[in-house]
Amino acid sequence: AQSVTQLGSHVSVSEGALVLLRCNYSSSVPPYLFWYVQYPNQGLQLLLKYTSAATLVKGINGFEAEFKKSETSFHLTKPSAHMSDAAEYFCAVSGGVTGGGNKLTFGTGTQLKVEL
Amino acid sequence: GAVVSQHPSRVICKSGTSVKIECRSLDFQATTMFWYRQFPKQSLMLMATSNEGSKATYEQGVEKDKFLINHASLTLSTLTVTSAHPEDSSFYICSAQNTEAFFGQGTRLTVV
């Protein structure tokens, strides 16, 4: 079984500041980890994914995440926040690549607010 | 990335009527699609796994007679909310998967 825990349902940063969204996972098998972004009344867009290759994963829009097995973490970061980054972010885990029938289990989400 | 189209984006229906939501993978074939429900300010809860040519697999607590899923082709899955009631009002999202999951735009269902 897999699960993810996102610490902090709301995070607020100033424009230009570092963004750090936390995600810890639990998995009985080597995990595949994902970060998605959701804008209001829209579906989810994949930001990046970890699939057992490089532990530092770079995604779209300047986001990156580092897989740390010792800490069971997959925190999402961005060096400099932009107003357009304001959205809901979901961490997700799968027991395999999300092809075929591998299910995604989502965290509860973190609402990112970017202030001037 | 691949495109998944979900239709309609918004629907308002009267209590007791049925509503059909379509999910199409536009540029790839998806043997498996997933249906999620999302309550306001909450995460996505998996409702069911839709398999082309076979019966859907429902998650515990999801009424299969209430939420009918049909996956008639490799590019189309439908979710029908039967005899809808106000408590069925929610945001429904589908995803189709090949090497990764691609999500539809979601459907905002309001039952009045």
Image (spheres, coloured by chain):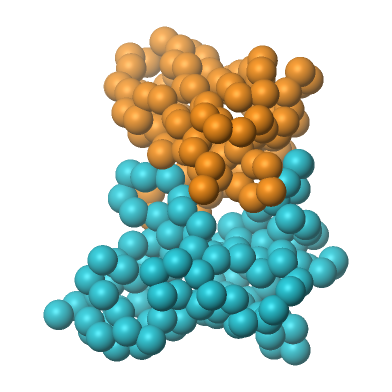
Chain colours: A cyan, B orange
Q: Would you identify the image quadrant in which residue A17 lies? A: bottom left
User: In the rendered image of this protein, does residue A87 appear above or below residue B2?
Assistant: below
Image point 37% across, 45% down: which residue?
A: A42
Give percent across and percent down for residue A51.
Answer: 72, 67
* Residue at image coords 61%, 33%: B28
Q: Position of residue A69 (x, y in %)?
A: 74, 83
Q: Residue furthest top?
A: B17
Q: Position of residue B41 (x, y in %)?
A: 39, 55
The answer to whether A67 is drawn above or below residue A101 in the figure is: below
Q: How many marks?
A: 0
Give the side of residue A84 with respect to residue A7, left or right.
left
Q: Which quadrant holds residue A13?
A: bottom left
Which sits in the foreground, A105 or A97? A97
**On the image, which quarter does residue B58 sit in?**
top right
Who's the residue at 25% across and 85% down the image?
A16
- Quarter of the rendering occupied by the C terminus of chain A: bottom left
Specify the quadrant that holds the N terminus of chain A: bottom right
Query: In this rendering, does residue A11 appear at all?
Result: yes
Residue B62 visible within the image: no
Q: Residue at x 19, y 78 (%)?
A: A115
Residue A78: percent from left, percent from top:
41, 81
Q: Nearer the viewer, residue B75 or A31?
A: B75
B111 left or right of A97?
A: left
Q: Residue furthest left?
A: A116
Towards the viewer: A112 or A46: A46
Q: Is residue B110 above or below residue B95?
A: above
**In the figure, A82 relative to B49: above or below?**
below
